[in-house]
Structure formats: structure tokens, C-alpha cells
Image: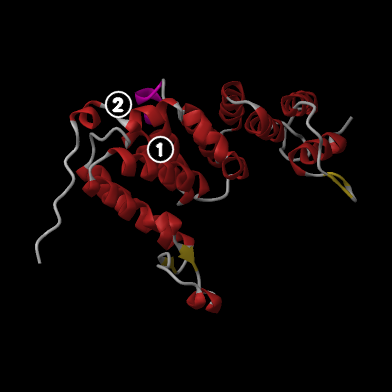
Amino acid sequence: MAKAKRKRMSKEELNAPDEIEVALANFWDKLVKFKKPIIGAVVGLVAIAIVLWVVGASSRSSAESRAEAMRTAVAPLRGSVGEPDPSEATIPGPKPERFADEAAQVAEAKKRLAAYVGEYGSDDSMQLVSLADANLLLDSGDAAGAATAIEQWLAKYPESPAKVVGLELKARALTAKGERDAAIAAWQAVAAAATGELKADALRRAGDLQNPVLTEGGDAAKAKAAYDEALAALGDAPEDAGLLGPQGLRGDIKNRLDLLPQ
């Protein structure tokens, strides 16, 4: 059977701007889509959001082999953990990879991302891949390694459209290391670079690190100032009301304010 001929790119297509460059320029819009996973700081979801975005950009603008290599590299991040649900067998289509636990999932993701870096180290998408890799260090319990990696990333890509994600990762790493003063400053840096819920969440976390109810040696006045600023960042949008009072991020912040010592 004769092989199908590959479609040759036109001169106009060859001269068109690299879509990864275009996508990087609009990364903030993409970040908004993933703000809830980032705000939740659920293990691995930041990496998934970033790397899946890279997959989309890479698939559209790069050679087929590079796109396939990226899909292989991020497959573990889209995988499942634990025993499969029997109902999965009835769902048509390919199934995600499954791992015994999160540690195995993170280890495999790190291994595959390292392989991708080894082959495509000069690729335009590397700034986001290396950011995801730093997040994996934190997810695997290596807060010190993650802090070092993200400092290097921020120094290398100071003008990256994804900088706010890097700042958020730095703040989480310093918090995990127990470096309270540095972590507070890092969360304040996230707040300065962000807007809306992401800004409010960063200020809430800065307040938590100064809250004497949550942290020994805290300062109630500083915590209150951070929480008040967080509420201001949320604006006048209607709050989620429940039987026990305000819900969601706004309710969470108000509950902290109510519990602060006077």
C-alpha cells in the first residue's frame, strides 16, 4: 500500500508567527481559565494546567514528533491514582494511565519530563515545562529543591507571561519550608502581580502566616490588614450565601476575621 503523502506547508504558513510565541503573549488569559485549580493549590493541578496548555500550543505550532513527545511526557499528570472504578470499563475510548499512589505518579512524571528536556532543551515551551518540573519537586516533598528551582526560573524568565504562576509556586515552596517572613513577602508579591480571586487568595495566605490563631508568634493587626485587603480585592461581587453564612473564598476570609483576637 502506498504511503500517504505529507501535506507540504505553504510559504505563507512557514513565514507565519510561531503560535507558541503568540500563546505566551496571551498566557494571562489562559491562566484565568485555570485560576481555581491554582487557588486551591491541589497537588499536581498547577502542573497539569500549565503542561496541558503547553501540549495545546505545541501541537498547533510544532513538528508532529515534538507534540507527541510532549503528550508522552505529561501523560502521567493526566493519569489516575489507586484502584480503578468498575464503571470505567464501560466508558469507551482510551483510558488514562493508572498509578498505585501519588508518589509513583509524580516520579513517573518527573522521569518523562526529564526525558523531554533532554531531547527538546532549546524548545520555546521549555519555560513552562521547567515550571511544571519545579512544581513536581514541591509535590514530591522537596520544598528546598522546588524553592531553588523556582528562583532559578524567575531569574531566567523575569518577563515571562507565566511569572505570576512562578511567584505562586515560590510562595508555596517557602511556606512548606517554614520560612515565614520570606513566605509572607512571596505571597504579597503574588498579590501585587495578580487580580481578583488569585490576588485575594494570596493575601489570605499572607494573613494566615501572621494570624496568631494559626501561627505561633503571629500579629493580629497585620493579619487583619491582609484579610481586609483580600476582601477588597474580591470587590463588590455577590457572595455565595449558605445556611451558616457566607461561603467560598469571601466567607473563608470573613470567618478568619471573626476568629482573630481583639
Pointers 2 and 1 in contact (CB under 8 A)? no
Do we see residue 170 in this rendering? no
Relative to 30, 257 lies left or right = right
Does 20 appear above or below 110? above
Closer to the chain start, of discs 2 and 1, is 2
Residue found 41% across the figure and 44% down from its top: 51
Please state the horizontal and vertical placement of residue 113, each as a whole percent of the image: 32, 48
> What colour scheme does the image use?
secondary structure
Please state the horizontal and vertical placement of residue 5, each as a whole percent of the image: 13, 52
Can you identify the residue that label 1 sits on?
Answer: 131
Answer few, some or many: residues within 10 Å of disc 2's Cα (few below 14, many 20 plus, some between 14 and 19).
few
Does 14 appear above or below 119? above
Quadrant of image for the C terminus: top right
Relative to 248, 199 lies left or right = left
Q: What are the residue bounds of the magenta stretch?
A: 152-158
At label 2, the amino acid type is Pro
Please state the horizontal and vertical placement of residue 137, each as a whole percent of the image: 42, 46
At label 1, the amino acid type is Leu
* Image mark count: 2
Prevailing SS of the magenta stretch: helix
Residue found 62% across the figure and 28% down from its top: 184
Please state the horizontal and vertical placement of residue 174, each as a whole percent of the image: 53, 35
Q: Identify which residue, 243 or 217, lies in the foreground.
A: 243
Can you identify the residue that label 2 sits on?
Answer: 17
Q: CA distance from mark 2 to mark 1?
A: 24 Å
Residue 156 drawn in magenta = yes
Q: Identify which residue, 139 or 234, lies in the foreground.
A: 234
Residue found 29% across the figure and 47% down from its top: 67
